[in-house]
Image (cartoon, helix red, strand yellow):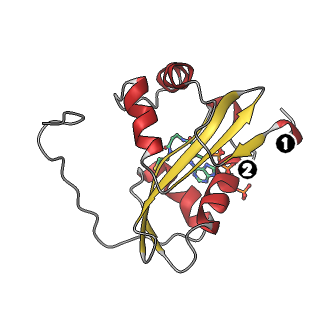
Amino acid sequence: VKSTDIIYTDSIRDIDWHALKARLREDDFDNGRSADQLRESFANSYAVCFARCDGAVIGKGRVLSDGVCNAYLVDLWTHTPHRHHGIAREIVRRLSEKLQGQHISLQADADVAGFYRKLGFVDQPHGLSRVVGKWLTRR
Ligand SMILES: CC(C)(COP(=O)(O)OP(=O)(O)OC[C@H]1O[C@@H](n2cnc3c(N)ncnc32)[C@H](O)[C@@H]1OP(=O)(O)O)[C@@H](O)C(=O)NCCC(=O)NCCS
């Protein structure tokens, strides 16, 4: 697709969550959330960004933030056939515009660390994380 055919949006309006989940699953980037959990996690985020082509989502990302100093970038993804055309870079740029003065953290696998370094992210000496209880299960 031409870059002019891609529309970037910062709202969850009109997103077909079942179609998005199916596409993520087919693209090997489904972390187990149901379509409704996917919607809820985006709805509860500080900022979201979708790249869309003919209505379909071909890229997305979101940030959690306290609105003051700390933000966390998650769910960044570009549909495999559309990779290496600057879509994720544009998503991160748009999300970052809403995070002036804030520190953005993220967790990435080694094979995508180079992408983030290109965008100015620097490696952190230690990353620690923990799941509380069972993944995706609320009590
Ligand atoms: C990582 C990912 C989001 C990049 O999406 P993309 O739309 O292809 O990225 P862009 O085209 O905007 O790339 C921007 C720059 O980073 C480079 N880049 C892209 N993927 C890269 C990678 N895996 N390693 C190193 N550099 C990479 C591009 O070549 C481009 O460089 P350039 O500006 O010099 O041409 C995409 O590969 C993806 O969805 N991967 C699977 C999901 C994932 O791992 N997400 C991250 C979770 S932390």
From the top left corner, tell me how far across and down residue 81 is, in percent: 69, 29
Secondary structure under tag 2 reads loop
Secondary structure under tag 1 reads helix
Instruction: Give the CA distance from mark 1 to mark 2.
Output: 9 Å
Q: Is mark 2 within 8 Å of ligand 1?
A: yes
Q: Is residue 6 above or below residue 108?
A: above
Q: Is residue 116 above or below residue 52?
A: below
From the top left corner, tell me how far across and down residue 123 is, in percent: 43, 70
Q: Which residue is mark 2?
A: 86
Residue 126 is left or right of residue 1, and the answer is left
- For the point 66% across and 61% down, which residue is it? 93
| Disc number placed over residue 124 in the picture, else none | none
Which residue is at the front of the view, 17 or 3? Answer: 17
Q: Which residue is mark 1?
A: 3
- Disc 1 to disc 2: CB gap under 8 Å: yes
Disc 1 residue crowd, few under 14, some 14–19, many 20+, Cα 10 Å = few
The kind of residue on which mark 1 rests is Ser
- For the point 51% across and 50% down, which residue is it? 62
Quadrant of the frame with the C terminus = top left
Which residue is at the front of the view, 139 or 5? Answer: 139
Q: State which tag comes first along the sequence, 1 or 2.
A: 1
From the top left corner, tell me how far across and down residue 54 is, in percent: 78, 26
Which residue is at the front of the view, 17 or 120? Answer: 17
Q: Nearer the viewer, mark 1 or mark 2?
A: 1
